[in-house]
Amino acid sequence: MAADGHVESHKLLTEDKIKSALESDRGTEAELLSWTIKDFTKKGDNYACFVTSVEVQYRLGGKERTTSYVAKLNPCRTNEALNEMMGKIFYREGTVFTKVIPAMNEILTQKGCPPIAAAKCFFCSLEKGAETLLLEDLRPRGFKMWDRRRGIDVAHARLVLQEIGRLHAASLLLEADLPDKNILHTYDLYDFFMSSESTKKMFGAMVVGQLDATARILEKFPKYERVCQWLEKIKHTSMDTFLEMLDPANYKPPFFVLNHGDCWNNNLLFRYDESGSPVQVMLVDLQVVRKVSPALDLNYFFYSSFNGPERRQNLEEFFKVYHDAFSYVMITGGFEQPFTLDQLRDEFRNKMLFGCISGMMLIPIVLSEDEDVPDFDVKSDAEMEEYVQERHKVLLKMSQREDGLLKPRLFDMLDEMIEFGIIS
C-alpha cells in the first residue's frame, strides 16, 4: 500500500486509524470498504512532519462513496533530538486541533462570528514514535498552496492578516472563559519544542551557519560591511535571543496572545473565485502555536513571505487590516480593544529583531528549488559541520542564480533593519 520512500511513515497508517477518522467524519454508520495512500506533496512543502493523503471508499445509507484525508505522520527520522522534538510538536498540534480551536469556535459561534479557518481533525494519536493526525482534506473545496517562491501579494495578505487577527483575539475570548484564565495551563502548552538542550544545540548550530552564510553573500557588497560586522557580533547569541523572544514568561497584556507561530506562505492555503482572486484562507500547520506578542506572528509573516516593495508600500494598510479584524472579534465578544493601532505599530518595531533572524533563516528556504531544500536529519557534530558547509554552498549558489530572487529579498529586509536601528 505504501509508495517508494517514506515507507516507515506510511506504516503508521493503519485500518483502525482510518476507520476511526471515517466514523468521526461521517458517523458510526459509515462502513469502511478500502483505503489507499496517495502521496501529493513535493520536497520543500513540509519540513517537520511527513504529509500524505488517504483516499477512502466507504458505504453509507446503502450507497458506496469516497472521501479523502490529509495525514500528518511522524517522519521516523534517525536524529534523536529531532525525534524528541517531534513528540512535542505533535502534542501541541493535536491539542490545538482537537481542543483549542474547537473551544474558540464554540465561543465565536455564540458571539455571531465566523469560526477560525482551520481544517477539522478527525483522528489524533500521540503514541510516541507513531504520532498520527488525520485531517480534513481541503483540496476538494478548492484550497491550494500559493507558490512559495513568489512573494505574497496584497490581496492574499489581507486574508491572512484578517485571520491571524481573529485567531489572536479569539484566544483572549477563550482565555477569559476558562476557569483558571490561563490558556497555557488549561491545555498544557508550556513545553516548547526547543526546550531540550540537544534540540537547542542542533538548531543553534543551524542558526549560526545560516547567519555565516548570509554574511558571505553580503561581504561582496561594501554597503553591507556593517551588517557583516553585526552578524559576526550576534551570531553566537542569536539562538538565545530567539528563544528569549519565544518565552511566554517575558510577555504580559496587552501584547500576550496565542500565536500561530509558523505563519509563512507554506502554511497557508487559499481558495479562489472564478476570476482567480483569493477569497478565503485556511491556516495549516499549527505545530508551534505559542502565547507571546502578536508582533511575533506579524514579523515572522512579513519577513518570510513578502518581497520588499509589497511589504514597505503596504505596511500601514496591513497593520490596519490586522487591527480591524482583531478589534471586531474583541468588541463583538464584549471586550475592549486592548491596544491602539499606534501601540501595535510600536510593538511590531520593538520585535523586528525576531523578524530579522526569522527572515535570514526562512528566506533561503522559501526561495529554494528542489535541489536546495535542506535535510534536517543530522545525527552528529561532524554531520552538523558538513550540513553547515553544504548550506553555505547552497546559499551562495542561490545568490548567483539568474532568477535574482534571493539577494533582493535579503537586501530589502536588511535595509529596513538598518533604517529602524535594529542593525547598528
Image (tube, rainbow, N blue to C red):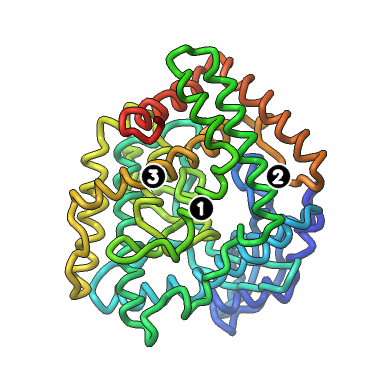
Say which amino acid is labelled 2: Phe
Residue 232, placed above or below residue 182: above
Dot 1 surroundings within 10 Å: few (below 14), some, or many (20 or more)?
some
Say which amino acid is labelled 3: Asn
Say which amino acid is labelled 1: Arg
Q: Image quarter for residue 181?
A: bottom left
Which of marks 1 and 2 precedes in the sequence? 1
Which of marks 1 and 3 precedes in the sequence? 1
Residue in the image at 19% along x and 72% along y: 335
Q: Is residue 4 visible?
A: no
Q: Is residue 289 visible?
A: yes
In the rendering, at what x and y percent does residue 411 appear? Answer: 43, 23
Q: Which mark is residue 139?
A: 1
Dot 2 surroundings within 10 Å: few (below 14), some, or many (20 or more)?
some
| Frontmost residue, 39 versus 59 | 39
Residue in the image at 51% along x and 25% along y: 229
From the image, tell me which residue sits under label 2: 376
2 and 1 marks in contact (CB < 8 Å): no
Closer mark to the observer between disc 3 and disc 1: 3
Residue in the image at 22% along x and 40% along y: 316
Secondary structure at numbered mark 1: helix
In the picture, measured across the screen, residue 95 lies left or right of residue 351, that is: right
Dot 3 surroundings within 10 Å: few (below 14), some, or many (20 or more)?
many
Question: Marks 3 and 2, Cα distance to the nearest angstrom?
Answer: 24 Å
